[in-house]
Amino acid sequence: MLSSVAADGNAVEMLERARRQYEAHRYQECLETLTQAGDDALDNPEFWFLRAAALRHLGKVKEAIKTARTGLELSPEHIGLLDSLGLALMEKRDLAGADKAFRTALALAPEHTTLLAHHAMALADLGRLKEAETVYATLLRIDPDSSQALETRARLAVRFRDPAAESFVAELLAHDPENQVGQLLRGTLALRRKQAGNAAEAFHEAAALNPGDAQVAKVARASRIVAHPLLAPSRWILMLGSGRARLVYIAMVVVLRELHQTALAVAWLFFWLIFVLIAPRALRIHYKRRYGSL
């Protein structure tokens, strides 16, 4: 009897520690603490929520989805688990599944501003813009000055290339300078303007706000590489993305061959090898050694 009480107490203590680590963005430590929590913690929905959320932030989306669904078998009406499942499904591009998860959560908490914001984005990604606008209007009615409302407006504006996107993102960051999504949106807008340095700065700020987020750290590292002065000659190619960049390479090779410009074709090959393949890879290794995740 006493050993059972002690075990329960230990599980609660470990879950509280895991919660503190999660809120401090120390996601790997959070997972390690949950592993040490013992079998008694498995009956607590908090265990599954923290594990699912931490896994998602670490980029382990498949595991996060599986974990959230396991937790929901134990506690089908846990709003945090439903939200985590919806977010993970969005990252997996299972937008219909995400919509269903958010709708289930909102049926339990119709005025939950975070859920409304996430659902609006899922609907927008599905292309159901009128529904997204309706959900967003509900969010504005409930709390027009909340970070969730400003963040959702900015995300929708950037997503659909609204001319007012710049001002919406600026307003979000003025309201909440440490809003990670705001910094990511600022970086996205800078990339669209082909301002690699400004994009790298914004993505670095986003990564610094949440050092445990592996996906954001990866974006920050990639943007820093593209902004490096060494890559100025090939930056326009790198900013196209791998797919379109490959098409540019093939098109140039075909054109030069058709024109019988063998020397230029060889020069183009060496340019590609040095400034598109070798130099970015070397910088990636350098930055990883020097800055770690950031």
Image (cartoon, helix red, strand yellow):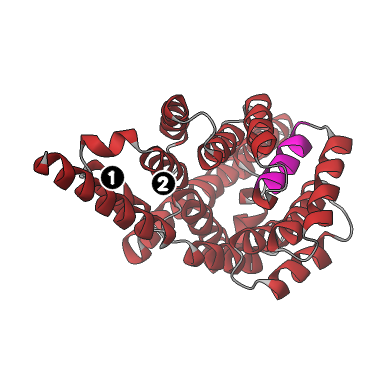
Which quadrant would the N terminus be assigned to in this image? top left
Residue 129: tell me if it is visible. Answer: yes
Q: Residue 152: where, in percent of width, then height?
A: 74, 53
Task: Name the residue that disc number 1 marks.
Answer: 34
- Picture quadrant where residue 153 is located: bottom right
- Picture quadrant where residue 24 is located: bottom left
Q: Is residue 33 magenta?
A: no
Q: Look at the picture and state if 169 lies above or below 259.
A: below
Q: Which residue is rendered at x = 69% and y = 34% of the image?
A: 107
**Rendered image: mark on residue 259:** none
Is the residue under label 1 in contact with that under label 2 (CB below 8 Å)?
yes
Q: Secondary structure at mark 1?
A: helix
**Rendered image: mark on residue 54:** 2
Q: Which residue is rendered at x = 57% and y = 47% of the image?
A: 267
Q: Residue 250: where, in percent of width, then height?
A: 65, 32
- Pick the residue in front: 265 or 170: 170
